[in-house]
Amino acid sequence: MARSRRPNVLFLITDQQRADHTGFMGNDVVRTPNLDSLAARGTVFESAWVSNPVCMPNRCTIMTGRMPSNHGVIFNDRSLELSANTHVRSFRAAGYRTALLGKSHLQHGMSRNSMMPTSQAGSIISPYPVGWDHYENDERYWDDLPEAPDDFYGFDRVELSIDHGARVSGHHYRWAVERGADPRHLRVPQTADNPMRRGGDVWWQIYDPPYDEEHHSTSFVADRTIDFIEEASAEGSPWVAWASFPDPHHPFTPPGQWFERHDPADMELPATFDDPMDGAPDYLKAFQRRTVHKMRNWVAMTGATSPDVTRAAIAANYGAIEMIDDRVGQILAAVERLGQTDDTIVVFTSDHGDMMGDHGLLLKGFMHYRGTLQVPMVVVDPRRNPGRTASLASSIDLGPTLLELADLDGYHGIQGHSLVPLLDDNHAAVRDSVLIEDDVDAPVDRVSFATSIRTLITTTHRYTRYNTGEDGLYELHSDDDERTNLSASDPALRAEHVEALTDALIAHTEKSRHAPLVEAEGN
């Protein structure tokens, strides 16, 4: 199909959504008709994996096309350098209107208290003025909107929904108040004494928020995305719209009708809910014994606690996903109404997954199992036939893919691979493995878990190495439940994967310059 104009890009991203929590990936309980319809006209990546199973590192990797250890954001405790090159900057330089609507988390405003402070000077002296990375600090939005930066990692328009669950902040807060929401019901604390309409009986992080669905973050993202697309279309400009939904990340708080979409009693527990975790690292067994009722804070690592908690979490998670699906339908309908469906590339993915009861674990955090590592991924290019591919793909590949689809140049240091060959041939391959990093900068003697983890996904196995000295080797397909650790029983296979992991680490070593060295004329 010939294009009459440069392609638009609609990037749909959710937060903490498992690959198997969509209809198009085989889930017959959660209802995602709009995402399923989108998948039916695009390429579904059945083996798509994150570069890091934590929000900020993986989001920054998607933006830059570089591994966390290279772009510098290894955890939710530091901001992406404002000067970092991104694929969005390439689109903007080519004359595109660009907008980020919803959750950003490229700066650690919402998570800046997640780590223990250090009294030591930093290893690098920041070249930026104080406050350069305060744009996502929620307290700046309570009374008025802060001045927007001219260039936010390539976005010329930014409207943020900063927090999770029922807590409303950022541009989302001002938007909801202007639409009649009671401010007292929006500033919901992330504690057990928060206001709620119903729920919270098995765990305070599962409840119906104290405001209507039209004020929820999912509605905000859809409304602002549609507004931006209409504005750019009226200008006649090609556009890149990041519709970034904060859900279905915990707290699990789908509003109103979406809270009651699924009865927890009808939810099936994961097959590995009672897994004794033979062969797993000791710290993961300790996580499994932790209860949600004694979490240090609302984002701490935890066990699944009980069947009742797990079923309630799954039911609310499904409700949140179904609300997102509904609003995705509204966005896609707007694109169609504006006559731009045939000129719009669409991506759908998530920044990472959730254990959701697998292996008796809940949420995320240094848990290198399929539940947190695999994500849904669809790329729709109207010029290409739909299909499904089992070839390996990674979050790091999305930026290079979009640049090639729009016929735009990349930049020095990109480590991802374009997935365009897989769009043209579902049996092609652009990589033989996916490297996954996971790090936290914390005093080793003050934490009780692995602070550095590396995982290699191949077409046949997952190999994970922890800085505790433990490791795990699991066969994909025949052991998708990841119950049998082959590291001890098959030393030859383990040695093969240790070597492959070493090669991958070398291949992803930082080699780029901030600016390529160019000699002056006449030298």
Image (cartoon, grey):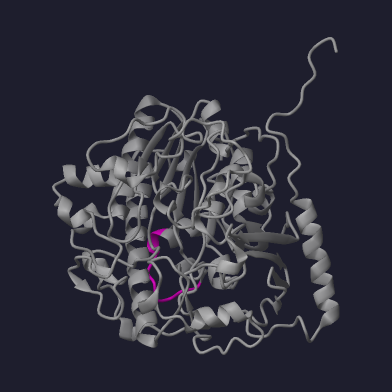
Q: Quadrant of the N terminus?
A: top right
User: What segment is highlighted magenta in the picture?
Assistant: 26-34
Instruction: For residue 1, say whether it is visible.
Output: yes
Instruction: For residue 350, say whether it is visible.
Output: no
**Compared to 27, does 395 lie above or below?**
above
Observer-nearest of 3 and 22: 22
On whether residue 183 falls in the magenta region, the answer is no
In percent of the image, x 49 and y 73: which residue is there? 355
Residue 345, image x, y percentages: 51, 44
Q: Main secondary structure of the magenta part?
A: loop
**Compared to 50, does 142 lie above or below?**
above
In percent of the image, x 61 and y 81: which residue is there? 282
The furthest residue to the top: 522
Quarter of the figure with residue 469: bottom right
Task: Classify residue 125 as left or right of residue 311.
Answer: right
Q: Quadrant of the C terminus?
A: top right
